[in-house]
Image (cartoon, rainbow, N blue to C red):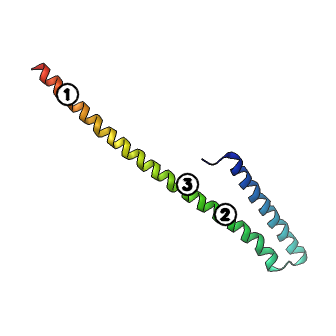
Amino acid sequence: MMPANESSDRDCFLERQIRILVRRLTRLEETQLTSTEVSLPIDRVNARIDKIEERMNRRFELLEARIDRLEAKFNDLDRKFDVAIAISLNRSRVSDD
């Protein structure tokens, strides 16, 4: 699980980049910034979003693998339980005779 401070740091980073982008867009309206000055922060935000998306995809894959392992273990336990119940029922029938 991701530490809370890492999530907070990421959120602060994204908010700061968005504020920078908004300020630069405002300046563009006022001073006609070059396209490079506008595209650089957008590229940085997009790169950061891509990294976050990759990290989240890896974590989802790990989570899905854990869920698959748990399901297999539960299925195995279910089969063992069924066998134990069947054995128990057979013993009770034999003792009733």
In the picture shown, does residue 32 fall above or below 79? below
Q: Determine the CA span between mark 3 and mark 2.
A: 15 Å
Q: Position of residue 34 (x, y in %)?
A: 83, 80
> Quick one: label 1, few (<14), some, or many (20+) residues within 10 Å?
few
| Quarter-of-image position of residue 79 | top left
In the picture shown, does residue 43 fall above or below 17? below
Q: Position of residue 18 (x, y in %)?
A: 77, 62
Outermost residue toward the right in this view: 31
Q: Dot 2 corresponds to which residue?
A: 49
Q: Determine the CA span between mark 3 and mark 1.
A: 44 Å
Of mark 3 and mark 2, the one earlier in the sequence is: 2
| Quarter-of-image position of residue 53 | bottom right
Asked which secondary structure carries label 3, the reply is: helix
Query: Mark 3 touching mark 2, by CB under 8 A?
Result: no
Q: Which mark is residue 89?
A: 1
Mark 1 residue type: Leu
Of mark 3 and mark 1, the one earlier in the sequence is: 3
> Quick one: label 3, few (<14), some, or many (20+) residues within 10 Å?
some
Residue at 86% x, 74% y: name it: 29
Q: Position of residue 60 (x, y in %)?
A: 53, 55
Mark 2 residue type: Ile
Q: Dot 3 corresponds to which residue?
A: 59
> 63 left or right of 35?
left
Residue at 34% x, 43% y: name it: 75
> 92 left or right of 78?
left
Q: Position of residue 5 (x, y in %)?
A: 71, 47
Of mark 1 and mark 2, the one earlier in the sequence is: 2
Asked which secondary structure carries label 1, the reply is: helix
Q: Nearer the viewer, mark 3 or mark 2?
A: 3
Q: Nearer the viewer, mark 3 or mark 1?
A: 3
